Amino acid sequence: MALPSEVKNNITKWYKALQNHIPNFISRAPQREMIAHVANSLNGENGRHLIVEAPTGVGKTLSYLIPGIAVAQNQEKKLVVSTANIALQDQIFNKDLPLIQKIIPEIKFIAVFGRARYVCPRNLTYLSPKNDGQTGFLDLFEDDEFNVNQNEAEFCLQLYDNLIKNKWDGVRDHHSESISDSLWQKMSTDKQNCLGRNCYHFRECPFYLSRKDIENSDIIITNHALVLAALENENTLPPPEKMLLVLDEGHHIADVARGALELHAEISLFQSLNQLDGFSKIIKQATTLFDPPEKPPLLKNIERFDDHIEQAKELADHLMMIFDEYLPNDEGSSSSQSTLFKENNKNQEPLYIFELGQLPEEFQLLCQALQTSHSRLASVADFFLTYFNESSNKLELAKVQRFQLQISRFFGYFDNLSQLWQLACKKTSSSAPISKWFSRSANPQYMGCYFHCAALRVSDQLSSIIWDRIPHAVITSATLRSLNSFHRIEDQTGLNPEAKDQFIALSSPFAHHKQGKIIIPNMKTSPVMEDEEKHLQEMLRFFNYQYEESGHKAFLVLFNSQRAMKRFIELCDAYQFTLLVQGDKPRARLIELHQENIKNEEKSVLIGMSSFSEGLDLRGDFLTQVHIHKIGFPPMTNPIILTEEKWLKNLKKSSFDLLSLPQASFTLIQQVGRLIRSHDCFGEIVIYDNRLLNKPYGKRLLASLPSFPLEQVDVPN
């Protein structure tokens, strides 16, 4: 189908108008090329889906927004733009779309986040020391899950005040102060614990307020997890035939999809029995108090319900017998079978990994029985939740809320277990094994027992949810290739040229050979585990020299190991560095502080994991030197990686060439890409890994990077 003249004219008109709104706007050939590809693809001219790698500087966001809006208007569809993190969502919502709106005044847009990113006003009110008394039903809680210390209570009061005065939109990442995970867990909620329309705070709930505006918006900015959930359950977002989809940071889509097929649960006997007794008690109370009509079969006879609870307890006991056989508490009695797959040292939880995800027959049959049992219990909980929602106008609200909240939690518990056992019963996912393993908590105060399942491949799931349902999607990112090839993303996602998917790698607009260089210090040690301490000390000596003598002021130090980063920071205590460390404050605030330091002619060092750098856009003097601790090979102690390695080995394939090296290449490309963000960026990239020079694979990794000159420098004594 040829691109309509109306679409062509609008794209041309809007693109020309950009130069009136962007200072020093430069029309770039790669950007014009991407605009044409996106327009043709969304209009259905070029095959199925478009996969386009658009290096930094191309201007990819505007390159898909302008044609996306033009085609969406012509086809009377909504444009859905999905990202992998809130930072990019905010950038598109607060920077790119307001710019577009100056050119196309009639467009309306909204940013939509997952429920877990929004504060629950009900919980926040209860946590505040001066709550208004309008949440009395929460006083019925008998546990201490809402207990906070004095400082936390005062902080919650500040948050509540910010919320009701519209100084905060209720999104965790948008508050100026960092909110700890433990406190956020108390003030947020999830689908199972949300009371919906039965909640007193429904009309002021940030989550539901955001959902109201979706229908009236032309452009929806959201995230990959929400897109997958919405398309699978047919809610929140427009139906597939009514949307155009752009997956920005598309390299994350497989990981996000895999997250839905990476399940675990505590299976400790005490935990299981406690949950079953609690569920039995609340269901019997609810049945007696409300006596709902048309009860499910399990509740028509209460003795039958009691029998099912007892059977579930027997299954839980049987499960723990199997668990203790494979991962006994006493290391000395460990079965010989587990030797190869058991990791057990002071730094890691004891594990037992089932080879290639193959369960013994006894455990396989037990998983089937557990899935049936927990599915039936989840259906009982779901019955009451549906009954409460449909009968809320006939029932006493305070009583309904108490039971709804508690039963919804049990529903979440049993539904998760049901899905876990269902996954455990499967042998493969997308023609690859499913990693399965037991683990014990490393915490000596609580020896929790857990079972885990994780799919290695999710291409079939992505096909059924997105690729086969959305006629034409655009998948883009600054980095989609590794080792100069699209093979990695093809393997992970199921996208394929044979399915008429179009793969395009645009050229960079920057002159990397003039704007920067790569420095590899002549290190005496390699960054391997046994030499990590010596290597970090050597790294610190070189970094200190650069900090004091090089003339640079703006530094970024990236790690692929949390342990190494923590140790490096400890070693830095002996020096007078200005450190801004990932996790100490919200990411946006750290960047603000870093920029303030540079504006004040002070030195500033941002330190974080590789993930911290993704989407980081510090231009010009705000970043002139990037330091990379080592090549980011995936950890070979991860059960999923170990299962995949074994699987590839059985297929007579090299796990290093197909798994480790492509992942390392991809990570290194992203880290190196932090330096040159515009034509005004100049600087150096220091990589503290001599394996780039003395290992055969080093040349392949360097060849996949931009064409920076390479320099070797001695480490000061």
Image: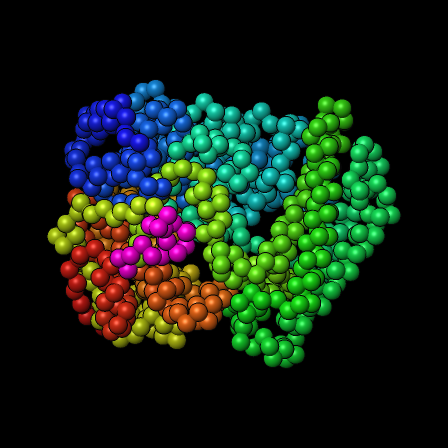
Task: Examine the rendering and report whether any part of residue 103 can be seen.
Answer: no
* Residue under the image location 66 percent in, 67 percent down: 361
Q: Position of residue 479 (x, y in %)?
A: 30, 50
Q: How many marks?
A: 0
Quadrant housing residue 518: bottom left
Q: Give the camera-side residue of 503 and 559.
A: 503
Lateral position of residue 263 relative to residue 45, left or right: right
Residue 527, position as x, y percentages in the image: 34, 70
Question: Is 260 covered by the magenta stretch?
Answer: no
Q: Is residue 512 above or below residue 160?
A: below
Q: Residue at x 48, y 30 (%)?
A: 238
Whether 55 is drawn above or below 536: the answer is above
Extreme residue in the top direction: 106
Quadrant in the picture for residue 100? top left
Residue 194 lies, with reference to residue 430, above or below; the image says above
| Residue at x-position 46% and y-position 65% | 644
Rendering coords of residue 507 (x, y %): 20, 47
Query: In the picture, which quadrant includes the C terminus?
Result: bottom left
Q: Is residue 215 left or right of residue 438?
A: left
Which quadrant of the figure contains the N terminus?
Answer: top left
Lateral position of residue 579 relative to residue 323, left or right: left
Q: Is residue 40 left or right of residue 273?
A: left
Q: Residue at x 67, y 59 (%)?
A: 367
Q: Quadrant of residue 379?
A: top right
> What colour-coding does the image apply?
rainbow
Confirm whether the magenta stretch covers residue 484. Answer: yes
Q: Which residues are magenta?
A: 483-499
User: Percent x, y for residue 173?
Assistant: 45, 40
Can residue 520 be spotted in the picture? Answer: yes
